[in-house]
Every structure is written in structure tokens, then in C-alpha cells.
Image: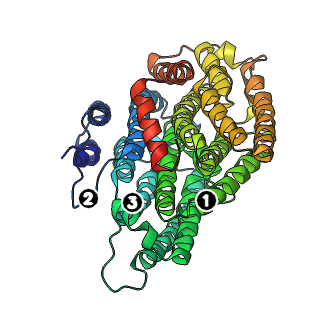
Amino acid sequence: MILALVVLVPVLGAASAALVKTSALRRAALILAAAVHAVLTGRMWFVRPEPIFHGWLGLDDLGLLFLSVTSGLFLCAAVYAVGYLGRESAATHSDFEENIFFANAPEAVFIGGLLMFLATMSLVTISQNLGILWVAVEATTLASAPLIYFHRHHRSLEATWKYLLICSVGIALALLGNFFLVAAASNGHSESTSLVLSDLIRQGSKMNMPWLKAAFLFFLVGYGTKMGLAPLHTWLPDAHSESPSVVSALLSGALLNCAFLAILRAQQICNAAGLGSFGRDLLVLFGLLSIGWAGIFILQQLDYKRLLAYSSVEHMGILALGVGLGGAGAFGSMLHAVNHSLTKGLLFLVAGNILAAYQTKEVTNVRGVLRVLPISGVLWIAGFLAITAMPPFGTFLSELTIVKAMLDQGRFVVAVLFLALLSLIFIGMSRTVLAMAQGRPADKLTPVTETWSAVATPILLAVAVLALGVYLPEGLTTVLRAAARELGGQ
């Protein structure tokens, strides 16, 4: 029953947000649903629930890891959203685009959309049937699209349309992957074929290999579109840039992980069928391509939210690369998924504070953040150091693990290329971030009193990613190792 509750609780919270009449009650429903969801998720670390609905819904170590990241990040985003909504509703009459949505759409749509987004992402993590998984991934698109369009600006409309169109094409390709997987599993037999992951893994060696290869390709391209792997990522910079900052944090830190999990399910089946190297080689290729592609755009980026979006493309490439390496690289990839979600959540929430103070996303018009927003300025620098894998942050540890896997396997060319691309990205991001943090702000800007709701959760996320660079809890290490083993790693 607890598996069903991680989906039902946010759905009930969304219904409550639609029915209550006051903003205070809606925001309370958001916090309560997020907190209950986090408690339910935390309980699963100690008591693993039994599969339900004939094994269609269940929780393995991979699912538990991504569900925990989603739940924890959403709770932080929900706390931030309460203050965000309060600040924006107080500025309803401002001419700036971040504030005009209150004049056009009720707050209930925003809160309800957030909670439905949580429900659909939770369903992705507990889906053991690949058909249900496909439905859940598509549902995340439908739940998050109104959040991207919430500013009712022409750029928001364009970003939402591009998001729906490109991701729908991707999910259609993933559906073809399911059809090909059924053909591979049936292998010419007329009896019905189960799409439950454990059944597919069990009969992996009996599958039709050409059909399975085709299925993996469609899964990789289809779900890779939603994950943001280059060159399939074109929806991502616009959607992340035009969304409210709290939504951007969830898109980057949680949604992309859901699409990644869908690809990992396909890789698990390939491993069982003896085609692990086929899938891993493709993941290495797409991983390096994504990192390089992101680096090119980061170097000349003049919009700091788009800069963070391209950083997400980079880190999705790192995740794919780690799994593609296998061995210790799979462990590093799983750890990096946690670190990236925490760090990108931190950066997007701080970007929201900067946007509220400066009322612009143009890098050239933002100077002196350390003077105008002292706490956010420090967090902005800390987030930059974390996202570029500087020690002692957790991202350094996870990327170091991936590099070590390359060297242990003798993939020196891949290692050199990987480190060169990371250096390029560091140069591009440092030039932008440090220029924003330092310098003299415009005369019309004065230091802003930063509320606890604006800085508390970014501080918590910064502390968490710093702590993971110094110490890995035993329970987390156990789950990371188990998740890596499910992917054929160690």
C-alpha cells in the first residue's frame, strides 16, 4: 500500500489545492503533501515494500535511489515555493514578466501542477512494467507543461510548445521501443509477453537479439530526448530558462533523472541478454557528445538560466558516460546523479533570488551579487564550485570515480577527452559566474534583505552536496552499490 501512497498523496494534495479558497491553505497543502511524501520515501529505506498489482509496481535499489532524490528535492522546492509565491503575489502589479502570471492564472494551478508533477515522477520510479513506465514518463510531460507556461509570456509559450512537441516525438519513439521489445521477448512465439522488468531479465538470453538492439536504440533516442542528451536536447534550454526558478530546479534535478531511469531499465535488459557492451558503447558515445555540445554553448552563453540548462546537458552526458563505462563507473554515475540533483537545485533556486533582485536574466546586466545579495552570492559561488566538480564537494568525488574507471579500463583517450571538455566548461562557467558575483552593481540597486524562505533550502542543499564530498553514509553507499550492480557495475 505504501507504494500506492507515494503517488496518491501528491494527487490528493493537488486536489486539495484546487478545492480550497485561500492561498495559505493551498501552500499548506503543498508543504504537507511534500513532507508526507518524504516520510513515506524515508520509511522505504528501512522497510522495502512488496510489489503490487502483479509486480507492475515495485521498488528496487535503482528506483529507491531516484525516488529519494526526487522526494528530497521536491520538499526543498516546496519550502522555497511558499516564499516565492508570497513574494510574487505581493508584486502582482510589477511590469516584470516574473510577476505577471498572478494576473492571468490562479495560484492553485501552480501548486496543483507541482504536486501532479511529483506524483508522475514518483510513478516513474516505482514502475516495474515498461508499459506503465512509458505512460508515467509521458505523464510527467503533461503535468509539467503548464508550469513552464505559467508566466504567460510569448517566450514561455514558445518554450512550452517546443517542450511538448519534441518530448512527444521522443516518447513516441520510446513506444516503438516497447513494441520492438515485445517482438524480441516473444521471439516468434504466439503467447502473450510480459513487460515486467524481472520477467524480461529472466528470459534475456532467449530474446531475439536484432529486435532487442532495435528496441534499445529507440529507448535511447526516445527517452534520451526527455533526458536532454545531445543532440536531442533542444527543448531543454528554453524550458529551463522560461520556467519559474523553482520549476527549473525540479526539471533539472528530478525530471531528467526519470528519463535516465527509463534508459537504465533498457540497459538492464541488454545486460541480461548478453548485449551489455552494445548499450554501454552507445551511452559512452552520447555521453561524450552531450558534454562537448554543452561546452560549446556554455562558452558564449549570455543568459545565466540557459547557462545552467546547458550545464544540465553536460551532466546528463556524464551520467550516461559513467554507466557506459560499467564497473566502478556505474557507481560513480549513480553517486553523480545524487550530487547533480542537489547542486542544480541549489543553483536554480539561487538564480531565482538573483532574478527577483535584478529583474533580468542577462549576464551583462548582473554585477555585484555578493554586495546586493550577500548570502545568495556566496551560495552562487559555492554552487559554481560544486557543479564544476571542485573539491571537497560531492561532485568531485563522483567525477573522480568515473575518471578512475576510465583509467582502470585503459580508456586513456576517453579520459583525456573527458577532462579536456570539463576544463573547457570550467573556463566558460567561471567567466560568467565570477563576473556576476563580483564587480559594482548598478546605482539603482541596493542590498536586499534576504528572507529565510529564499535562502534556507539553498543553504541546506549546499551543505548536503558538501557533506557528500567528505562522507558517504553507509546506507547510501549500500544502495549506490546495489544500484550499480543492477546495471552490471560494481
Q: Amino acid at mark 1?
A: Ser
Question: Label 2 sits on what residue type?
Answer: Gly
Residue 252 relative to residue 116: left or right? right
Residue designated by label 2 = 55
- The percent coordinates of residue 406 (x first, y second) are 70, 42
Which-is-in-front pick, marks 3 and 2? 2
Label placed on residue 226: none
- In the picture of the structure, the residue carrying the numbered disc 3 is 133
**Extreme residue in the left direction:** 1
Task: Report the residue at 69% width, 59% height from top.
Answer: 231
**Which disc number belongs to residue 277?**
1
The first of marks 1 and 3 along the sequence is 3
Q: Secondary structure at mark 1?
A: helix
Asked if marks 1 and 2 touch (Cβ < 8 Å), the reply is no
Secondary structure under the numbered disc 3 in the rendered image: helix
Mark pair 3, 2: CA separation: 13 Å
Quick one: 26 or 291, which is closer to the camera? 291
